[in-house]
Amino acid sequence: MTTHSVPTTETAVLGGGCFWCLEAVFDDLAGVASVESGYAGGSTSHPSYDQVCGGATGHAEVVRVTFDPALLSFRDLLAVFFAIHDPTTRDRQGNDVGTQYRSVIFCATPEQRATAAAVIAELDAARLWRNPVVTEIAGPAPFYEAEDHHQEYYLHHGGQPYCQAVVAPKVVKFRKQFADRLKRKPPAG
């Protein structure tokens, strides 16, 4: 008798503006095993940060989130994703403008695609925002890990002005809204 092992983790690749913001939030989410900043959805193999920021490669800044579906469903992961960025602005998050900052879900499976479509339909029906959700639902795409200095950026550079102005407010919002889903208690202060 052959037994089939059930995978203990799943992977989601999500783009919602600057990858530093997404990584900082998902690092704190219970059920997440790892988060890597990178690039997906473009035409250049192994692009650099400068190439992606230039906008010519077609890549989005993304995070690859590895999570335990027994502790965190893909739907719950998307609930956090949609709470921490504006999914109604095409190719833009705040002052970051360009296709590299688009809201996108690179679905690894047909189940992820169906869940993403259902969640977006529910969000649009709920009219949480003035404008409709424009998040792109894409198929799997090669993921290129960003340079080492972009990994855990907020953890290592939290005092940097961009982190204070852009990343920190998203982390605070996440910690308040999803306090029951945190991996660990946030530091006092």
Image (tube, rainbow, N blue to C red):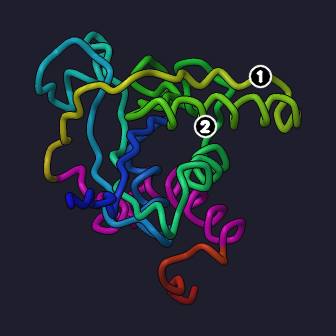
Q: Nearer the viewer, residue 173 or 117?
A: 117
Amino acid found under the numbered disc labelled 2? Thr
Q: Residues within 10 Å of mark 2 (few under 14, many from 20)?
A: some
Q: Residue at x 38, y 50 (%)?
A: 20
In the image, is residue 172 above or below residue 167? below
Q: Based on the displayed image, in which of its 4 quarters is residue 58 positioned? A: top left
Of mark 2 and mark 1, the one earlier in the sequence is 2
Residue under pointer 2: 115
Indicate the position of residue 39 as horizontal and vertical percent values. 27, 32
Q: Residue at x 34, y 68 (%)?
A: 155
Q: Nearer the viewer, residue 25 or 32?
A: 32
Indicate the position of residue 143 as horizontal and vertical percent values. 23, 34
Indicate the position of residue 11 as horizontal and vertical percent values. 35, 48
Q: Residue at x 48, y 78 (%)?
A: 183
Q: Residue at x 66, y 77 (%)?
A: 180
Magenta segment, principal secondary structure?
Answer: helix
Q: Secondary structure at mark 1?
A: loop
In the image, is residue 5 above or below residue 82? below
Q: Is residue 144 magenta?
A: no
The boundaries of the magenta stretch are 149-178
Amino acid found under the numbered disc labelled 1? Pro
Residue under pointer 1: 132
Pick the quarter of the image with the C terminus. Answer: bottom right
